[in-house]
Amino acid sequence: MTNNTFPGGVWPVMLTPFTEDNKVDYKALEELIEWYRKEKVSGLFAVCQSSEMFFLSLEERIEIARFVKEKAGNLPVIASGHISDSIEDQVKELRMMGETGIDAIILITNRLAKQEEDDEIWLNNLKLLLAELPEDLKLGFYECPYPYKRVLSKEMTKWCAETGRFYFLKDTSCDLENIKDKLEVIKGTNLKLYNANTATLLESLQAGAAGYSGVMANMQCELYSKLCEVFEVQNMTKLSDELTICALIERQVYPVNAKYYLQEEGLDIRTVCRTKSGHELNETAKAEVRILRRITKNMCREYL
């Protein structure tokens, strides 16, 4: 990246395609990168929960990040991938990830403290990590729901923003007031907020959020790109409402359903996953995904 901050818009949480024998399918991954590009994304979030990062080896996580960065061209690439419990092991993971050439490392908020531990412990552990990472390495946060969701408070967000080291926050709070609190304290800093929740997305954009980084960018990506692009000059309430109802399909068998959707799009991607069995997507669920795709095509004709 040549500028100091990342572009607003849509940053899909990337899937990891697998072969039938459960290895990373790099041919399908390259095809997926090109699909995202066609859907007018602003950047790529590799090695995240949608990538099944907790079920990837360290070598796989590093190689996926390196590969995505190599194939992404002019698209910025960010990645997470520190899944260990100990700070020492996380430092190793993060240093290796930093050597892949990606544009920022995204820290998982729940890796920095146990669920029952308070913000003071969380902040002390963050300071330990920061001391071990190069100061010129751009950083961000992801409020990953697994193994538990740790939503940043207004106070912790403010502290992080004021360091000048953080550029990207994937917010999963699904709480507009929490989002507005964060937007208030990051104003004028490098840190930008990207909402993962469709129901609060439009209002968060109007309040100053930079864009969308969520599951549905693996299905209705270009419609989210359109919403983020024109919400300031066009009334996007109808599109926002329709996307919110469509997003209920997230409660299906994800990420299997997203891979099936992409199959219907013509991508050579299997429904093989490590987090769930592809067989969990039964015939009724597949029909629902096909219906979603038909709805999406009609929405594209209306809005794009």
Image: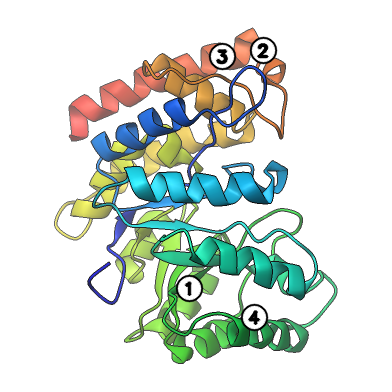
Is the residue under label 2 in contact with that under label 1 (CB below 8 Å)? no
In this rendering, position of residue 117 left or right of residue 295: right
Determine which residue is flagged by label 4. 129
Point out the frontmost of discs 2 and 4: 4
Position of the N terminus by quadrant: bottom left
Position of the C terminus by quadrant: top left
Location of residue 68 by image quarter: top left
Describe the element under mark 1 as helix, strand or loop.
strand
In this rendering, position of residue 18 left or right of residue 262: right
Residue shown at the point (37%, 34%) measured from the top left:
220
Describe the element under mark 2 as helix, strand or loop.
loop
Along the viewing direction, whichever of 130 and 143 lies nearer the viewer: 130
Q: Does residue 154 appear in the picture of this structure?
A: yes
Q: Note whether 247 is above or below 178 in the view shown.
A: above
Measure the C-alpha gap from mark 1 to mark 2. Answer: 40 Å
Determine which residue is flagged by label 3. 286
Label 2: how many residues lie within 10 Å, few (<14), some (14-19) or many (20+)?
A: few
Q: Does residue 47 appear in the picture of this structure?
A: no
Q: Which amino acid type is marked by label 2?
A: Asn
Point out the frontmost of discs 1 and 2: 1
Determine which residue is flagged by label 2. 282
Describe the element under mark 3 as helix, strand or loop.
helix
Residue at the outermost right position: 116
Is the residue under label 3 in contact with that under label 2 (CB below 8 Å)? yes
